[in-house]
Image (tube, rainbow, N blue to C red):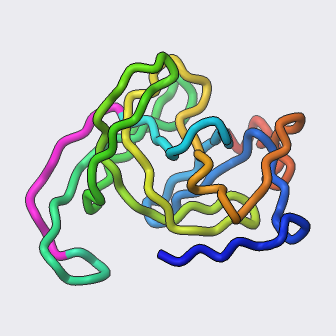
Amino acid sequence: MERRIRKVAELPVLGWKEHVELPEWGLKLRGKLDTGARSSALHVASFEPIEERPDPTSGDAVPFVRFDVILGPKRAPRRHTIEAPLAGRKRVRDTGARAEDRPVVRTRIRCGPLDTDADITLTDRTGMNFRMLLGRLTLEGRALVDPAHGYLVTGPRTRSER
């Protein structure tokens, strides 16, 4: 994959937290933009490998995974079951510096002017404030992050939108 690095002045500035869309899966959620994290991560409640299927892009047989993403408030959670091609596995250190072997999927990510395909590791982020984390490999050469402000490009949601 070829990356085009643009001049800093041309890059959009995003807040340290923004609303993130995963349009291929029909998901919208709050995300933390974390330049201290290398990988992007998504909270999943369950994960299971399923049979091989033709890849939607190449047509080659690839392993697929099924996972559940929980969205909405704790008092009224909504479960979204997603099936996607497994892009690989990655060894990642969590916030407690413990190494974890995580499955990786690839999908489109939109966050304001940021619109890219990126790898996302699947993990249990229970206890974390954000179910989605955008790491620096997703942001690199595409956006800058202002750590002093949140929702610079996507705006905070009103109560009726939650």
Residue 117 in the figure: left or right of residue 65? right
- Quadrant of the rendered structure where residue 91 is? top left
Q: Viewer-proximal residue, 141 or 113?
A: 141
Which span of residues is magenta-colored?
45-54
Up/down of 151 relative to 75, above or below: below
Q: Viewer-proximal residue, 41 or 140?
A: 140
Up/down of 90 relative to 9, above or below: above
Give the x, y percent position of residue 106: 40, 61
Up/down of 93 relative to 18, above or below: above
Residue 161 lies in the magenta-colored region: no
Q: Viewer-proximal residue, 50 or 71?
A: 50
Give the x, y percent position of residue 102: 31, 39
Residue 35 in the figure: left or right of residue 69? right
Q: Residue at x 79, y 54 (%)?
A: 144
Screen quadrant of the C terminus:
top right
**Looking at the image, how many numbered discs can be counted on the residues?**
0
Q: Residue furthest bottom?
A: 58
Q: Which is the main secondary structure of the residues drawn in magenta?
A: strand
Q: Residue at x 75, y 66 (%)?
A: 113
Q: Residue at x 86, y 49 (%)?
A: 152
Give the x, y percent position of residue 124: 39, 28
Q: Residue at x 39, y 20 (%)?
A: 98
Q: Residue furthest left?
A: 51
Give the x, y percent position of residue 19: 69, 48
